[in-house]
Image: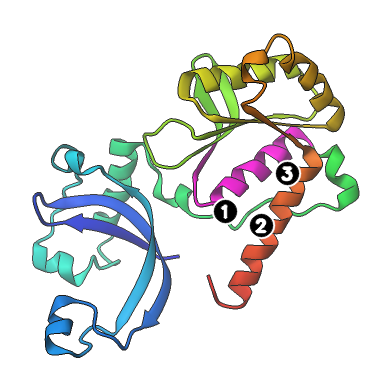
Amino acid sequence: MDPIFFFATRPVSGVIGFGRIQNKFIQDRPMWPDEIELKQVLYPYRFDFHIDYVLERNRWRSDRIKIPLTIQEMRRGINILLERTVSALYEAFVEKFDLSIPALMIADQAPPLPAKSERTTLNHSHLQEVVFHIGRLNRLISEKEYPMENERLDVVWRRVEKSVPTYVFEIQAGGDIYHALGKLKHAYDLWNSNIFLIARKEDLESATLLLSGTFHEIKDKIKKITIDKIQELYEQKRRWIDMEREVGLL
């Protein structure tokens, strides 16, 4: 998907966001004011786009990214050959917003789909990749090893940059269920996040006992998912998106 930058001219001048072109098409109906006035199509080549990040309007003046181009040059678009300008934009997004543009793309190197017989033996690292990529497929900002005070959360999904995690996942392919529940409870207390525990069936049974006692405050808040079910969800999503690409919808 081709990257696009959003450039504001009023009330300030500068780049205020980033997205991706999703679908290019030719339109035969007037849409813009001058087209409607003339009752004819002047700009037939159009595209749909997905917004990955955009500044809140009250931050345009303080946080916009200034680039050394005139309004006329911006209207013609940034020539991809202007490598220094494009590189500067990428670096500015990382510096100002801690936002790496390539990292927002849905990665092609997604985890392979193992046989059903292998699901229950999947290790922590693979399951972490699976949940990470489900977030990407949902067009959310997905991150692994997200810091929370002195802890690290396995995977979080956020809706917009600079926001707190909307979804928090802890993965237990064996290990300390008590510690995992403790981190999820803290994430819920801090951010009111949607919290999920992914584990083997027998470990989820142990978690149920703890949720009836020590962690009773989050008993009705936490969602428990088996390793088999999260892998099935990933498989279904991958196949659906692969099918959409095959028929040209993506």
Kind of residue indicated by mark 1: Leu
Q: Which residue is mark 2?
A: 237
Kind of residue indicated by mark 2: Lys
Q: Secondary structure at mark 1?
A: helix
In what quadrant of the picture does the N terminus appear?
bottom left
| Magenta region includes residue 127 | yes
Residue at screen point 40% across, 61% down: 20
Q: Is residue 184 above or below residue 166?
A: above
The outermost residue toward the right is: 117
Label 1, label 3: how many angstroms apart (C-alpha)? 14 Å
Q: Which residue is mark 3?
A: 230
Q: Which mark is residue 26?
A: none
Q: Quadrant of residue 167?
A: top right
Q: Secondary structure at mark 3?
A: helix
Disc with the residue nearer the chain's start (3 vs 2): 3
Residue 7 point in image, percent of width and height: 20, 57
Residue at screen point 58% across, 26% down: 153
Q: Mark 1, residues whose alpha carbon is within 10 Å: few (<14), some, or many (≥20)? A: some
**CB atoms of marks 2 and 1 within 8 Å:** yes
- Compared across the picture, whether 214 is left or right of 6 comes to right
Q: Quadrant of residue 75?
A: bottom left
Q: Which residue is mark 1?
A: 137
